[in-house]
């Protein structure tokens, strides 16, 4: 669907469309940032193999964004799934940034993606939302997405501009997305963010279907998501729990990773992470398996979104989430030692 067709389909901002309904999602979802060359280049054939391998092993939801490799992730997802029946999987992508050529093929933005010659700029306007989605549909080789998320609003991202961005999100971005939902271009709408506060601000004023919350409701931490998780459950908002390893901190097989919240982990964070590894080792349990399974126990969580870049990583995630039984007393000990909040819901 081209931009002009999208414009004609949704009419004018200000309508009051019926609320969408989140489709059934697979327990484990494919996070597409890594195949957008997050932190390191991924060969084309490896990226396509990872997506196809995921589908073959039961992963049925695929998430991406224009920001992930400046369209590279969406393009690779679209190419990998081109021969797969569209009704056999669900897709989510995001709006709020537009991809453009950087004008300097040697320059590379300091945002973690190993892609040169392109950049992404924020645009939460109605026109920006429509242009972003049109480009995403073209890259994904489809005429619809199942879930459309407004990407990276919040004070941590926008600082002193947060109030203006929030106002535009409520008055322009989200109403435009709601119209797209009412016309079937997407089935559900929500936010894709890394912080609780902005979720609470939006949910107080606008009815959402879904939240993708990255790194806040995880085995490693629950404190900074307690309010929004409770509110999501009360309001019937589905939560897509992303970043279950907290940027790799709990993703290693035998020891904590070096990164947390997209940066190098400090000594205190690594020491706390090591306590998880030590306790899980006592029970012969892979810490990564506990990290993937933990969020799914919460009644508001619809899926866990795990960033994957290779068939081997797919195999590991599938094994961790479905092939690693975790004894109930491990969860009890994690709570008793203070590594889990006392009120945390466990499997």
Image (cartoon, helix red, strand yellow):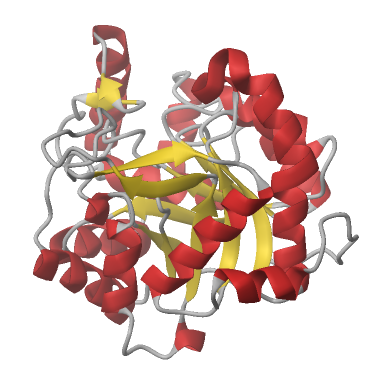
Residue shown at 20% from the left, 49% from the top:
37
Q: Is residue 95 above or below residue 59?
A: above
Q: Position of residue 157 (x, y in %)?
A: 50, 24
Q: From this view, report whether residue 1 is shown above or below residue 180.
A: below
Number of marks in picture? 0
Which residue sits furthest front?
A: 103
The answer to which quarter of the image holds residue 209 is bottom right
Front residue of 94/289: it is: 94
Q: Please provide percent x and percent y for residue 87.
A: 51, 87
Residue 74 versus residue 312: which sits nearer the camera?
74
Q: Is residue 195 left or right of residue 245?
A: right
| 281 vs 46: above or below | above
Q: Name the residue: 70% across, 57% down.
A: 177
- Relative image position of residue 275 (x, y in whole percent): 29, 21
Comparing 118 with 96, the one in front is 118
Rendering coords of residue 143 (x, y %): 53, 80
Q: Is residue 323 something that shows in the picture? A: no
Left or right for 75, reference 252: right
Please say whether residue 83 is visible from this viewpoint.
yes
Tell me which residue sits at (54%, 22%) in the image.
Answer: 158
The foreground one among 337 and 122 is 122
In which quadrant of the rendered image does the N terminus lie? bottom right
The residue under the point 54% across, 45% down is 96
């Amino acid at each position: 669907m081209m931009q002009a067709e999208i414009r004609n389909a949704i009419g004018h901002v200000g309508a009051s469309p019926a609320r969408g309904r989140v489709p059934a999602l697979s327990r484990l979802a494919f996070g597409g940032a890594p195949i957008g060359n997050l932190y390191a280049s991924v060969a084309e054939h490896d990226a396509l193999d990872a997506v196809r391998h995921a589908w073959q092993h039961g992963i049925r939801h695929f998430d991406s964004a224009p920001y992930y490799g400046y369209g590279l992730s969406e393009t690779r997802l679209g190419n990998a799934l081109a021969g797969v029946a569209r009704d056999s999987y669900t897709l989510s992508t995001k709006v709020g940034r537009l991809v453009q050529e950087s004008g300097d093929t040697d320059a590379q933005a300091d945002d973690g993606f190993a892609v040169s010659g392109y950049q992404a700029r924020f645009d939460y306007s109605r026109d920006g939302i429509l242009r972003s989605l049109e480009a995403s549909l073209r890259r994904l080789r489809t005429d619809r997405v199942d879930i459309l998320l407004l990407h990276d609003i919040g004070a941590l991202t926008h600082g002193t501009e947060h109030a203006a961005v929030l106002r535009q999100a409520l008055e322009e971005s989200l109403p435009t997305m709601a119209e797209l939902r009412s016309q079937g271009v997407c089935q559900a709408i929500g936010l894709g963010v890394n912080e609780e506060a902005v979720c609470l601000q939006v949910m107080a004023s606008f009815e959402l279907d879904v939240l993708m919350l990255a790194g806040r409701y995880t085995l490693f931490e629950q404190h900074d998501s307690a309010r929004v998780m409770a509110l999501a459950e009360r309001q019937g908002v589905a939560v897509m729990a992303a970043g279950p390893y907290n940027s790799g901190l709990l993703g290693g097989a035998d020891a904590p990773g070096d990164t947390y919240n997209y940066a190098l982990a400090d000594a205190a964070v690594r020491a706390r992470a090591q306590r998880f590894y030590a306790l899980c080792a006592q029970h012969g349990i892979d810490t990564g398996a506990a990290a993937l399974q933990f969020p799914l126990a919460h009644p508001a969580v619809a899926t866990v979104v795990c960033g994957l870049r290779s068939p081997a990583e797919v195999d590991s995630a599938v094994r961790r989430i479905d092939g690693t039984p975790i004894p109930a007393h491990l969860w009890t000990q994690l709570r008793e030692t203070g590594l889990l909040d006392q009120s945390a819901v466990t499997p």
